[in-house]
Amino acid sequence: MAVVAVSACFFVASVTGAALTVAVRGNEPTPVPFGAAVFATAAAGVGAYVLARLAGRAPRPRRIFLLLTTAGLLASAVPPLQAATTVSTAIWLLIMHAVAALALVPVVASGLPSARPSRGPEPAPQASPQVAGTAPMDGNQ
């Protein structure tokens, strides 16, 4: 679903005439290929899955997952802002990041429990009640 949503954004950006170009490390501006957007979105999906599996070990898996993905989304805004050659490119790249996150994060988070079941100490075995005045039944009678 995320790949389809990002593809739609890429298509709309292209149709509206936005030149999605980036310049990395001082190189000449190059257009962002469609395949790069698809690959990055698919990689984000795999990353979300791995992150969910790791967060599943935490006492509050959903909360940890949401905190980490929010931090990741904020951090992922930096490269587009640094590499974009135009304001419209930066805006479209940020929109694609947000659309991918909106398609991935709620779906993955909904599969995580809000809290892991506690694994407290095992309850002590209860002795069988004895009737007053009788000998315990141990099978040796």
Image (cartoon, rainbow, N blue to C red):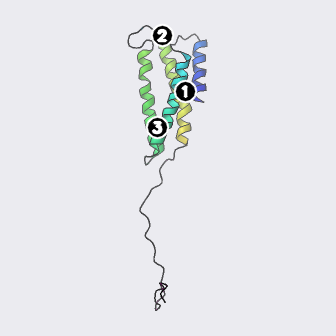
Q: How far apart in space, not on screen, are marks 1 and 2 (Cα)?
A: 23 Å
Q: In the rendering, which numbered label is found on residue 44?
A: none
Q: Secondary structure at mark 2?
A: strand
Q: Reading the chain from its start, which is encountered first: label 2 or label 3?
A: 2
**Does 91 sit left or right of 3 as displayed?**
left
Q: Nearest the camera: 87 or 59? A: 59
Please provide percent x and percent y for residue 33.
53, 15
Q: How far apart in space, not on screen, are marks 2 and 3 (Cα)?
A: 32 Å
Please provide percent x and percent y for residue 13.
57, 15
Image quadrant where residue 26 sits: top left
Q: Reading the chain from its start, which is encountered first: label 1 or label 2?
A: 2
The rendered magenta stretch, by its main secondary structure, is classed as loop
Q: Which residue is mark 2?
A: 30
Q: Secondary structure at mark 3?
A: helix
Give the magenta part as a residue range: 113-141
Q: Nearest the camera: 89 or 48? A: 48
The kind of residue on which mark 2 rests is Thr
Q: Which residue is mark 1?
A: 99
For mark 3, does the 10 Å Cα neighbourhood hold few (<14), some (14 to 19), or many (20 or more) residues?
A: some
Residue lying furthest left in this view? Answer: 25
Q: Is residue 76 above or below residue 13?
A: below
Q: Nearest the camera: 34 or 89? A: 34
Q: Is residue 40 magenta?
A: no
Q: Which residue is mark 3?
A: 51
Q: Secondary structure at mark 1?
A: helix
Q: Which residue does the image show at 52% across and 35% down from the upper left?
A: 105
Q: Nearer the viewer, mark 1 or mark 3?
A: 3
For mark 1, does the 10 Å Cα neighbourhood hold few (<14), some (14 to 19), or many (20 or more) residues?
A: some
Q: Nearer the viewer, mark 1 or mark 2?
A: 2
The kind of residue on which mark 3 rests is Leu
Q: Reading the chain from its start, which is encountered first: label 1 or label 3?
A: 3
